Structures are given as structure tokens and as C-alpha cells.
Image: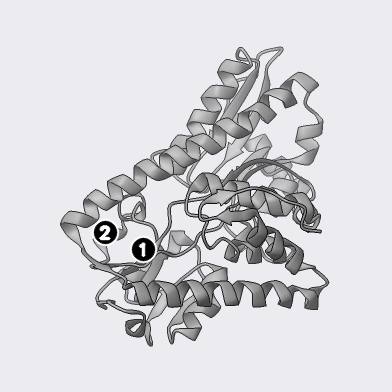
Amino acid sequence: MRLLALLALLVLAACSRPVPEGVTELTYASPYPPSHPFSRADQTWIDFVHERSGGRIKIKPIWSGALLSADMSMTEIRHGVADIGLITPIYTRGGTHLLRTQTGFYSGADSIESQLALYRCMAKVEPQFDKELEGLKLLALQGGVLPGILTSTARVESLADLQGLRIRAPTELLPVLRNLGADPVDLPMGEVYSALAKGVIDGVVAPPETLQSLHFGEVTDYFYDIRIPRGAYPSRAMDMEAWQSLSDAERAILEEGIGVWEAALAEENRAAAAAGEKIAASTITILPASTQDQQQFDDLYLREGQANARALFRVGIDGMTAYRAARQSLVERDTVQCGDTK
């Protein structure tokens, strides 16, 4: 794998200009095009690193999935396919049991800032987080605006209407939706547009921003506005070997850039959500959830989150430490304060 990565980088190097003396060039890979909100946040970070380093660190972006895959991104970064990249732990094949499961512990963390804070509270007390990120230097966490359920032709006005619908959902929501009678599936977001257009799936758990950023407004008719909790996750990381090869001054700039990158991602998420809501108001039918349905969903979400945390014992992972940290750190709705949960 390392050999293939080096060959790929040699091909890229042959097509680029030589790096000036005194400049460190790092490749950044993303599956998204430059126009995507995530990529605009990436560019904000790239500009910060260039300016903060006085041009001594050059980030070379490679967009649109030219280097990284959705399900192998963490392994590819570890093996040097790119120095830095967008990672997707929820799609990774093995080795990210807790990173996938913990995204179901966030009920009550409505804002992006509280989602990131809650992740850090859990990671502070449970070393399994760092173990699953071994070989990577984490450069940004990502949260998001709370999603609802977009559907193509099925009009969902209550939880009962989900019966029999094939819905794309993140891992932590699969058992929740099954309990509500739906037929949930987990597939990369890049495949959802086609699946909706072809009728392979009936809907998708997604925030309003996807109406514009992923063009879901073209293939959906309804938005069931039930407030679905959303978890934070590691989203940008660097190959540890590449990280260790940097000077102390260069590492300090990238450490400083963590907050810049996370703030840019949050800003782009909110801006895209606002644009999506504007599109929704004019092109699709918004169907509000009742108070009773919202409470039923929240109760089921927490029950499944705890059950999934306990189930991690089967693979030798203490998921309950992270779950307790999440619930105890959320001192009130959307207010996070880490405590001693050991």
C-alpha cells in the first residue's frame, strides 16, 4: 500500500512545479469538489496555513475523490496516499467501533459547538478514541446542523408513516428506524442522489443544506422536520509519519489551525443550511413533527444509544464510559461541561 501511495505521489509530482527551497508542500485530499461547502471550509484553512506560515507551508489540494475513497480514507491517509485528508470513520471497514457508535450519544447537543465539546469530553476519559485514530494526527472535528428526513414521493407526517420506507441513515440511526418499521440502509452520501432518482431508496436522513450542496432538492418532494440528534466525528487528519517529519514551528501552525478549520466548517454548515431552508420553502413540502412524535423519537434514540454502547463489550470495548461521559457532560440542553465520569 505504501508503495502504491508513493507511485501515485510520484505521478502527481511529475505534473507539478518543483517546490521552492525552504517551502514544505503537503497534499490535501477530499472526495468533494471545490464548490462544496466542506471544500470552501478546507480552502479557508489552506489560506490560513499559507498566511500564518508566511508561505513556508504550501497545501496542495486534490479535490473530487481523485485520491481518497469513502470506506478506506483512514487507511489511505495512514499509508501516505495524501499527507492530509478528509476522513470518514463511519464508513471505514473495521477498527472504528467506538467512533461509529459514539455518534448516537448526542441527544440534546443541538449546536455544532456543543457537539464538538461533547466529543472532546468523551475522548478525554476514554482512550479507545485515540486507539482507533492510531497512526493519524487529528486536525479537525466536524458536527452539523440537525437533520430531518427527506423523501422523494412518500409523504411522511408522523413516525407511523415511516413504516416500510427504505431510508438512508447513518449507522447510529439504523436500529432506531428499524424499531419504527422503516427499512434503513447505510451507504455513502455520494451515492444517495442516484439512489433517490432511481427509486432504490425512498428517502434520506439529511439536513436542509443537502437540498443545495448535494442537489437533493431535485429528487425529493418532502421534508419531515423531526429534530434528529447529530454527532461530532473526526473529519480531517494527517498521516502521523508526515506529522512527525515537520518542524516544531510547522506543527504549531497546524495545531493553531485546528480551531480555524472547525470554525470554518461550522460557518459553512450553517450557511449551507440557511440556503437549503430557503430552497425548501419554495420547492418542497415541509411537514412538521408533533411534540409526541419528537419525544418518542428522542426516547428511542437514547435507548438505542445506550444499548449500542453496552454491545461494544462484545468486541472488548468499554462503550459505557463514553456514553456516561456524554450524558453527564450535557448539563442542560445544548450546554456541555466536562466532568469526572470515571
Say above or below: 219 vs 332: below
Disc tally is 2
x and y, in percent, of residue 272 in the image: 35, 45
- Residue drawn at x 64%, y 52% is 119
> Quadrant of the image for the C terminus?
bottom right
Q: For the residue marked with disc 1, what is the amino acid?
A: Tyr
Can residue 293 be seen in this snapshot? yes
Say above or below: 243 vs 308: above
The one of 327 and 44 positioned closer to us in this rendering: 327
Looking at the rendered structure, the secondary structure element under dot 1 is: helix
Mark linked to residue 283: none
- Residue drawn at x 52%, y 50% is 143
- Residue drawn at x 51%, y 75% is 299
Q: Residue furthest front?
A: 332
Q: For the residue marked with disc 2, what is the amino acid?
A: Gly
Mark linked to residue 217: 2
Label 1 vs 2, first from the N-terminus: 1
Mark linked to residue 193: 1
x and y, in percent, of residue 226 in the image: 36, 67
